[in-house]
Image (cartoon, rainbow, N blue to C red):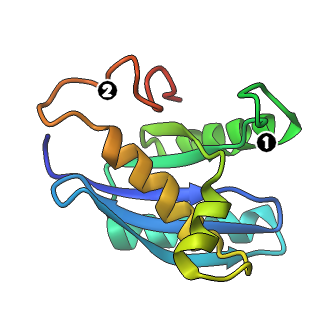
Amino acid sequence: MPDETLLGFDFGEKKLGIAIGNTLTRQARPLEILFSETRDARFGRIAELLREWQPQRVVVGLALASDGGEQPATARCRRFANQLHGRFGLPVVLVDERGSSMEAQQLLGTNAPDDAVAAAVILQRYLDALPAATDSPSAESPVAGSRV
């Protein structure tokens, strides 16, 4: 697998958790939580982060229902992923985010939500699903067929 920098996003309408990761180390870590009043402010900050970190792709958590089906939040996540791809031209991968907030709370040992840690959990799932070789993700992977 080539060495790539990745940004991960836990999308929410009021706040956006952001994480950074690397395919060589296969590690993700929380970066920041973005609170923005407007879409332009949100995408302005994302543009700054893209300039700073120069990722080769981005990973967006896909909010599926507990049964794996679509829900209203799923469409919002897809729209955000499409906007990222359209504005910045980077490959975007959608990853099932079910349980990521609960996992983040367990990692923190608190019930307080931390969207940046949830973004790191989502990004780590993507990194963990990558094959050791340069092959594409397997059919069993949570990211297979989820590219924007």
Q: Is residue 60 shown left or right of residue 15? A: left
Residue type, numbered disc 2: Pro
Q: Does label 2 or label 1 sit earlier along the sequence?
A: 1
Q: Position of residue 106 (x, y in %)?
A: 59, 71
Query: Considering only vertical position in the picture, is 94 above or below 118?
Result: above
Q: Position of residue 122 (x, y in %)?
A: 51, 53
Figure disc tally: 2
Residue 45 visible in the picture:
no
Viewer-closest of 88 and 125: 125
Which residue, given by chain and number where applicable, does mark 1 sit on?
A: 76
Q: Position of residue 47 (x, y in %)?
A: 52, 65
Mark 2 vs mark 1, CA separation in Å: 25 Å
Q: Position of residue 42 (x, y in %)?
A: 69, 67
Q: To which quarter of the image does residue 96 belong?
A: top right
Which residue is outermost to the top? 139
Q: Residue at x 46, y 71 (%)?
A: 49
How crowded pointer 1 is (Cα within 10 Å; few <14, some 14-19, many 20+) is rated as some
Q: Tell me the number on the disc at residue 37.
A: none
Q: Residue at x 40, y 44 (%)?
A: 126
Residue type, numbered disc 1: Arg
Q: Secondary structure at mark 1?
A: helix
Q: Secondary structure at mark 2?
A: loop
Q: Residue at x 31, y 26 (%)?
A: 137
Which residue, given by chain and number where applicable, does mark 2 sit on?
A: 137
Q: Residue at x 55, y 62 (%)?
A: 119
Query: Considering only vertical position in the picture, is 148 above or below 15?
Result: above
Q: To which quarter of the image does residue 33 belong?
A: bottom right
